[in-house]
Amino acid sequence: CDRLSTQQGVSLLAYDTPCDMLANIPARAMNLLVIHSPEDLVELSRTLRWAKRNHPRCVLAVVSDEPAAELDARQHGAMYFQGDVDPWQWTGLLESAQQLQHSA
């Protein structure tokens, strides 16, 4: 795990790759998973399937410029953002995660 921080009451873990996350699975429930610039689409699919199976109430998002990543993200129920994500979009993701956290 690279970084651990809390933003707007939501704990954020940052990993370098989806594989790093699967090798160091978070001990607590996840409310938000953002995968940035996945290089390996097989790894992306595996990570998204794992997240949906183990954290069904988790908000999933993929940030990438790779067109194939968009299709993969949407097939697994994740939001897709191309290029730079606007601050209001990050705010929306965090608010969604907060709502899930408080409704559990």
Image: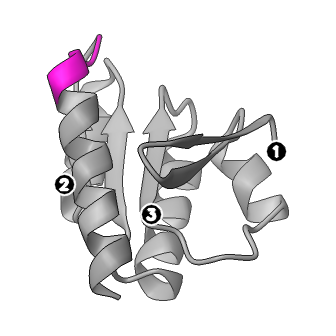
| Position of residue 72 measured from the top left corner of the image (x, y, whole percent) | 29, 51
Amino acid type, residue under disc 3 in the picture = Leu
Asked whether residue 64 appears in the rendered view, the answer is yes
Q: In the rendered structure, find residue 74 and report the number of the disc placed on it.
A: 2
The kind of secondary structure the magenta stretch mainly shows is loop
For the record, the magenta segment spans 84-88
Left/right placement of residue 99 relative to residue 102 reads left
Q: Quadrant of the N terminus?
A: top right
Residue at 38% from the left image edge and 73% from the top image edge: 101
Q: CA distance from mark 2 to mark 1?
A: 26 Å
Q: How is the image coloured?
A: one colour
- Which quadrant of the structure image shows residue 60? bottom left
Q: Earlier in the sequence, mark 2 or mark 1?
A: 1
Mark 3 neighbour density, 10 Å: few (under 14) some (14–19) many (20 or more): many
**To which residue does mark 3 refer?**
48
| Position of residue 24 measured from the top left corner of the image (x, y, whole percent) | 83, 61
Left/right placement of residue 3 relative to residue 61 reads right
**To which residue does mark 1 refer?**
1
